[in-house]
Image (cartoon, rainbow, N blue to C red):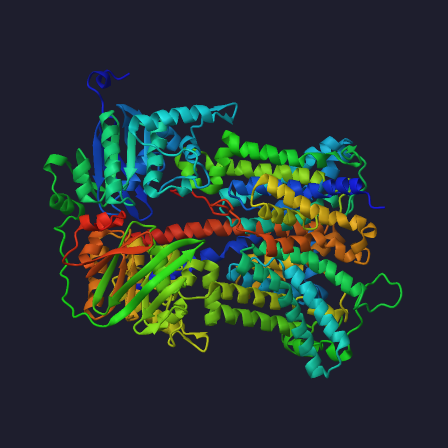
Amino acid sequence: MFNIWYFLLRGLQTSAPVAYGALAGVYSETGGIVNIAIEGMMLTGTFFFVWGAIAFKSWIMGVLFAILGAVLLSILHGIATITFKVNHVVSGTAINLLAMGLTRFMSMQIFGMETQTPVNSYIPPRLFGINILAYFYIALALLTIWIFRRTRFGLRLRSCGENPWGADSLGVNVYAYKYAGVILSGVLAGLAASSLYPNQWIAEMTAGRGYLSLAAMIFGNYNPLNAVLAAMLFGYAETLRYFSAQIPFLVNVPSTLIQSFPYVLALVVLAGFLGKTRPPKADGVIFEKGED
Amino acid sequence: MCPVAETKEAPLIELRGITKVFPGVVANDDISITLRKGEIHALVGENGAGKTTLMKILYGEYKPDKGEIRVKGQPVRITGPSVAISHGIGMVHQHFMLVPGLTVLENIILGSEPAKGGVLDTAEARKKIEAIMAANAMPVDLDVDVEKLPVGLQQRVEILKLLYRGAETLILDEPTAVLTPQETNELFKTLRALKEQGKGIIFISHKLDEVIEIADRITVVRRGRIVGELPVQEATKAKIAEMMVGKPVLMEIPVPEVNVGDEVLTLEDVTFVEDGVKKLDGITLTVRSGEIYGVAGVEGNGQEELLKVVSGEYRPTSGKVMFGKQAVNSLDPLRRRRLGLGHIPADRQKQGLFINMPLYINAVVGWQWQDRFSRRGILNYKNMRTTAKEVVEKYDVRTPSVEVPANALSGGNQQKFIVGREISFDPTLLVAAYPTRGVDIGATEFIYRQLLEEKSRGKAVLLVSADLDELLTLSDRIGVLYRGRIVKEFSREEVTPEKIGFYMLGGREE
Amino acid sequence: MSARTTAQSRERWYRILEGSAPVLGFLFAMLVMLVVVELIGESPSRAISAIVRFSFSQAGIAYIFSQAMPLIIAGAANAVAFQGGIFNIGVEGQYLFGALCAGVAGAYLSLPTYLHIPVVIIAGMLGGMLWVLLPAFLKVYKGVHEVISTIMMNQVASALVLYLVLGPFNGVRGQSLNLRTPFLKDTAVFPSLHDVINSITRLFGYEFPRYVAVDFSWLISALVIIGTWYLLTRTALGLKIRWVGQNPHAATYAGVDVRKTIFTTMMISGAIAGLVGLQSVAYISKYFTPNIARGLGFTGLAIALLARNNPIGVVFAGLLFSFLNRAGYGLQLYTRVPNSLIGAISGLMILSVVVIDQLLRRYVRNLRRKEVGQNV
């Protein structure tokens, strides 16, 4: 029997990594830094989670480690794009390559296995059968909207993504806010990683979810809540595969194809339903102080 | 505390011996100026004379290599805009520094936000700003996206930003460049009121009439040095102009008498609609051979669209564009160039050049399709280099060679290169958009002569400019563009700046 | 006259300086690698000798060259795209789908050799082009960034080839772990080029062993490189591609149809990408399998970045990455350093190359400004 409640809960969990990832994108791009590196940050985060959880026998340490791993890469992305003014997409791509090698190398060094870790039993607690982290991202999106609209930090971060020269002329430390945006992006990528599959790390296990997060962010027109809702659209599409045997029109669709549903859906959405998006005006633009 | 400063009031701002060197250029060479309370001090000079650099040093955006800044008699080190702001110094940049996507209120408070524990206190900010707006008669709607305001109001927001921060010294860099004559009057009213309150204002301009009208004192800068300072009572236009350029300026360029020939460009009832907005609304005009047709108007009234409809980047929604007798509505820019269109673009860096590519490639931009540059899809670099060298030599472009990338050239030389390129291909119709924007007087005069030369050779020139003097000097006829319409057309004989200004603002014939 | 020649020699020096980032980045990454080797308790000199021993043996050199071929093609596919301002992260999916198409064309069609091989090649190219068609359309008409759309296409390609090889194009009877299409017909299999290549290399006292793939795909790689080099530097289309890549506004002003050029660029890139898997499909295994080596598209991206999108540079960068792969195995075999270190180091190398490149360009730009300042 198709259990609608179970489907809804399961979908909430499946959506979590993409939803946190989409928020990660929102923080970075609101500050004007295009962040393709979310994929690599999530991948590193997944490894660090398992490492931290096993080493300290605690899922909380797992989450902290996941955040640490993702943040380290986000700082690297910041150094390349903000301090050294490298093209954002180029830096992000290089970091993704780095993450793929780095996680394998660390897994080999720490666990003696290159493409997977041992099973980790220190996973976040479950509430109604799903990862407890899956209950927070909608609230986090609302909190983010509040931060952007109502706090000094949010106002300044937005100004750096829209017109960094203007912000600079008013004494706002543009470089610092851009770093803050990217680093927060890393924190959220760490949460995305913690909500993905904390039982074990497997090489390249993020399988493009970081990029899917960016698609959700674009579809949500850079608005935190809409980005999360778009992520949930993709997440529920992915959830269908667990239920395909119970859903009449999916029974005969091979499972290999159902796997690609969220990606196909993302393409369909981008092709057919994407209205005019308004990215921050200086998103991806290299900011230089006048004299450099 | 310095006793002298208290007894005899020290000037608001003193700059002493400021020197600033950029790679290859001395931007400021031992400059000293002062600004007193309740004074409007104009800084005039050509583009590139070093005025903006000096002000950016005062505002903390550049570090001086030498020299001292004193605020109210106290030496200070201004290491960044926030330090300048804390010393009561504020600056309105030539290109506005407003943040799109933020409301007027957010723009005003940005960087000096009243907040409790990081949470914005917008109620308090609103109260404070409303008080300032009331005191200075400068109302603006605080809750609209600043992007949506007209330029005059955007500038008002910029000034409110300074007043909100309690600025006593206001630096305005070319504030009137983007304003209509009437908006300028409004601005001047505001400035006089601020002066009455004891603010000091530094006013940067190269429009001499305005300077004489508004300033108390005038300092002239040339090539990074001060060439003189005089009270406004002693100033005349001719005197300032002479100081600016160092030699008597040729105020009148001889305009050749040319017999006007056939229509080269005709627009018939051209309308262009974008996102439901009529950017061009029933434009009808003709440019004939041997004639320069000037288009006047406040920027943003359809100039960009007009240029693109003529160049072929946009297709008109309705109406007819004709080159000679041929309708070209459906022809793309390339095909129009094949019919003899030359085009000096509005933005040389963004449109006219590939700044990272060598000059010999830039020499054929727009003309790359000619047989001598590419035959059956294969490029001929030898001919490109030859052409580039011709342009460089004939149009006096200062460059070490044609192998260097375009970004190695100064702005004026880039512009001369583009003008030379477009003319050297011998077009029958030359579209010139803001041909001397950001170019020094020497190069400006050179470019004027080239355009007039084209006219005497029987070419048709469509000149779009924001500079009324330029339009009046060069044009045989002038059309005034307002909200996408040519609201009035003047011949050279009947035109005056006042008449143009009246129509630029949407005035109508009674 | 002498002023002109010094200006020219100075310009040449600037070019060299601007172009030296890949070398410096490589050296930096190698330095970091040796430090890491030291840190994990292995001796750097042992590591170096392991790399040299394993990479520069007769077999080592042969494998480096042979395995560089798909990398060079993937690098060229990315370089063309980059030159046109496009990030084709979808080379991955494009070669996967292209390889499937080539495999199917080779297995199911019956043609004489002189037709069958070209058909297999064209099938690969068409497969790659088909897989970039939607992203190209989205880019041109919807403004969807190609990084997002091509990544999605990669995921879809993975699922689709699996489905197709499980279903309609399954070449395995009964149960088998090695999922694959049917074997290619003999007429579709690439010929070996051992004799031709060895007749040249013998002059230098070297011979490629028979067990290393020296095949028709070498010729394809060479043609791809010469073709992209010629396209980008000698043709009007190439100039348009570079213009659009550098500044679409200026390209529009110059009368270039920017959308059409972007579309063309993506199609060319996709067609080249479709060739990446051919060595595996049409020579080494003689069938298509979803287990075909993955990640070449991403390595190709790194190669293009390292080569600064210069097709000739792609050859060297491709060989370098092939060498790094080999070096990784050498380390794994003879020392306690795992193979994956090389993967991490390549990522770091790309990052340092782009950072150094940026710094050098700025430095040279300032030098040029100074020079022009003096001249005026």
- Residue C68: x and y in percent read 65, 64
Q: Residue at x 65, y 55 (%)?
A: C152
Residue C335 is left or right of residue B212, and the answer is: right
Q: Residue at x 35, y 52 (%)?
A: C369
Q: Quadrant of residue B343?
A: bottom left
**Number of labelled discs?**
0
Residue B478 is left or right of residue C182, and the answer is: left
Image: B296 above or below B389: above
- Residue A187: x and y in percent read 63, 36
Closer to the camera in the image, B118 or C355: B118
- Residue B41: x and y in percent read 21, 34
Residue A15 is left or right of residue B70, and the answer is: right
- Farthest-out residue, right: C174
Q: Residue at x 46, y 59 (%)?
A: C246
- Residue C41: x and y in percent read 71, 42
Closer to the camera in the image, B196 or C314: B196
In this view of the protein, can residue B129 be seen by the observer?
A: yes
Image: B322 above or below A257: below
In this view of the protein, can residue C27 be seen by the observer?
A: no
Closer to the camera in the image, B24 or B394: B394
Q: Residue at x 74, y 76 (%)?
A: C189
